[in-house]
Image: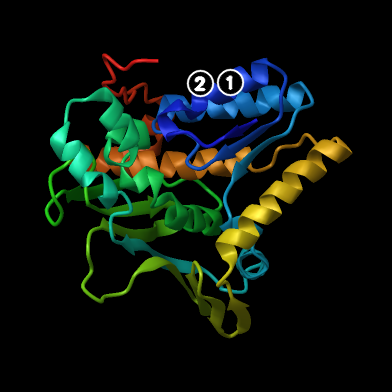
Amino acid sequence: MAIESPPYFHPEQAAAAVDAGVHVYLAKPAAVDAPGCCSIAASGRQATGKKRVFLVDFQTRTNVFYREALARIHRGELGEIVFAEAFYHADCPFEEHYELLTAKPNDPEAKLRAWGLDRALSGDMITEQDIHALDVASWVMDSAPLSAVGTGGIKARPKIGSCWDHFVVQYAYPGGVGIQFSGRQFKGHGTAEGIKNRVFGSKGVLETTYGGQVLIRGEHFYRGGDTAAIYKEGAEANIAEFHRSIREGDFRNPTVEPSVMSNLVTVLGRKAAIEGRAVTWAEIEKDEDRLLPDLKGLKD
């Protein structure tokens, strides 16, 4: 079963699919809140127990240049990690729905069609879109952050829906490592766009661009290469891996745990920014706050 619906529905749909005994191919993000992430993790474990495949589709983690660069970092070729940067800067991909949501702001069908502008349905931009940049950061660190502080709001695009148009978050990781993240969904007027990460180590620097170059500068230079076709190639690789796992009876389902981790990293940053305070990972692990869309009156 392929689940490509608004992220709010993913946990319930995935759980139902696993209960029904089918294999699951799930789009990112896996969920919009911490309880949803816990549900996805449980469904992944249940799928393994029932000998079913459960794959979460992140294109970046299939790319040969990203994989090699990250393997080198985890071997220590970057030295001690000092700090890192991650950003996802882009126009709003849901601009086509502005007119609909402006005309019918309380209409449940309009909200569902414009789900990317609804925080409960999408998880807000930091979860629905920015997870790509934060997933790379999480991959690099290979551990959960300790805490986060942040800010954000909606200032540069029309105040339509419930999502913000920017987030700025500082994550604190073990060992005194800080990761600075920023994301925007409004016009940049010619400034840098895209999904970019930089990791500064005592022996070198990793630079990655989704759809661009991946390389390591420094003592252990790695030329890497261009990832211009990463979206298409990544999707094809994940579909092929899904089919291979089914054919060969490989039910380890290794994409679930890191996908849930990255998803929770976005929830941590969102909560810190919205509540205007430092939020710890321990809080997020126990967080029971749920995002619930208002779709009252929606017809079948």
- Look at the numbered disc 1 and give the secondary structure of its residue: helix
Which quadrant of the figure contains the C terminus? top left
Which quadrant of the figure contains the N terminus? top right
Disc 1 residue type (three-letter): Ala
Question: Image point 80% across, 41% down: which residue?
Answer: 245
Pointer 1 residue: 15
> Which of 231/60 is in front?
231
Pointer 2 residue: 12
Residue 161 visible within the image: no
User: How far across and down, in percent of the image, does residue 6 sit?
Assistant: 42, 34
Question: Image point 57% across, 29% down: which residue?
Answer: 41
User: How far across and down, in percent of the image, does residue 235 sit?
Assistant: 62, 53
Q: Badge 2, how many Cα within 10 Å: few under 14, some, many 20+?
A: some
Q: Badge 1, how many Cα within 10 Å: few under 14, some, many 20+?
A: many
Q: Quadrant of residue 139?
A: bottom right
Dots 1, 2 in contact, CB < 8 A:
yes
Q: In this view, does 45 lie above or below 2?
A: above
Marks counted in the figure total: 2
Apparent side of residue 101 relative to residue 230 in the rendered image (left or right): left
